[in-house]
Amino acid sequence: MKVAVISDVHGNRHAFEAVLDDIAVAGADEVWCLGDLVGYGAEPDACVDLAHDHVAVCLAGNHDLAVTGEIPLEEFSRGAQLAARWTQEVLAPAHHDFLGALRPEGEQDGIGLFHASPRDPIWEYVLSALLAELCISVQTQRICLIGHSHVALSFTRQAGQVATGESRRQGTELDISADEWLLNPGSVGQPRDGDPRAAWLMLDLGQLTAAYHRVDYDILGAAAAIRAAGLPDSLAERLEYGQ
Ligand code: ZN
C-alpha cells in the first residue's frame, strides 16, 4: 500500500489542492494527515472539506485544538492567536465538530502517528538529532511520522548507535526497511525550510521506502486570500519565502 503523508495545511486551500493533485498523479492508496488543517491561512472551511473528502486518517494539531477550544490560545504567538480567533469565528459549525473529533496521536498499519512528537504529541518541535534520540527511545513503533515543525526531515537510529537526522529535499527516497525512523513530510500550507513549495511524503508500506515531494502552487493567490481576510500581513509574506 502507498500512503501519501501530509501535515500542517493551515487553511491554505491553494497549496492543499496542488498537493492533492500531485498525490493523485503519483497514485497513493490513502492520504494521512498529521494535523493543523486550520490556523494561519484564509480558507479553513475549504481545507476541512478537502480533508473530509480525501484524507483517510487525520490527526489534530495544536492549531486545530486551539480553534475547538481544547487548548488555551494564550500559549500561541500573537499572529497565531489572531488567526485562531478569526478561524473560530468563520469556521462552519459542522467543521468545528469535524476538528473536535480528531486526536493528536494515533497508529495506522503499525506506523506511529503524532502531530508534534512521540513524547509530546501537541507541542514538541523535533528539529535536532538530540531530541529525536529522546523521541525514538520512547516510541513503540519502528517507524513514526511527525509534523508541527513545518520542516521536511528524517531522523534514524541503528541498533547500538545514536540518532542522526537530515533535512530532506524533493526527490530524496529513503530505504526504511531496517532501523528506527522518525519522518516529517514538511508542511503543505506554510513551509519553513526555505523551499516555499508545498511538501508531502510518499510512504510505500510494501517496499518500505519514503520519498519526499514538493509541488509548486499559487502562492500569490494564497497570500492575497490572507490579506483579503484581514489576517496579519506577515502570514501572507512568509509564504513567498518558505519561512
Ligand atoms: Zn503547524
Image (spheres, grey):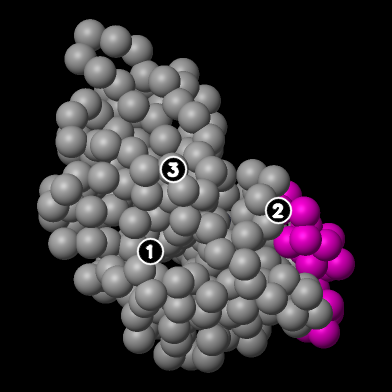
Helix, strand or loop at mark 1: strand
Q: Badge 3, how many Cα within 10 Å: few under 14, some, many 20+? A: few
Looking at the image, residue 200 sits to the left or right of residue 230; the answer is: left
User: Which sits earlier in the primary sequence, circle 3 or circle 2?
Assistant: 3
**Quick check: can you spot residue 164?**
yes
Q: On the image, numbered disc 1 is attached to which residue?
A: 33
Q: Quadrant of residue 63?
A: bottom right
Q: Is residue 113 above or below residue 137?
A: below
Q: Which residue position is annotated with label 3?
A: 172
Query: Residue 79, percent across and down?
Result: 76, 59
Labels 2 and 1: the sequence-earlier one: 1
What separation in Å lies between label 1 and label 3 (alpha carbons)?
20 Å
Question: Which segment did they paint magenta?
Answer: 226-243
Dot 1 crowding, Cα within 10 Å, few <14, some 14–19, many 20+: many
* Residue ID at (64%, 44%): 193
x then y, percent, for residue 146 = 40, 46
SS at badge 2: loop
Residue visible at 20% across and 15% down? 159
Q: Residue at x 16, y 62 (%)?
A: 1
* Residue 242: numbered disc: 2
**Left-right relation of 20 to 180:** right
| Mark 3 secondary-structure assignment | loop
Q: Determine whether, in the image, residue 2 is placed left or right of residue 98.
A: left
Question: Is residue 199 a member of the stretch shown in magenta?
Answer: no
As drawn, which residue projects farthest toward the top? Answer: 160
Q: Position of residue 229 (x, y in %)?
A: 78, 83
Query: How far is mark 2 from mark 1, CA to CA?
Result: 20 Å
Q: Nearer the viewer, residue 231 or 153?
A: 153
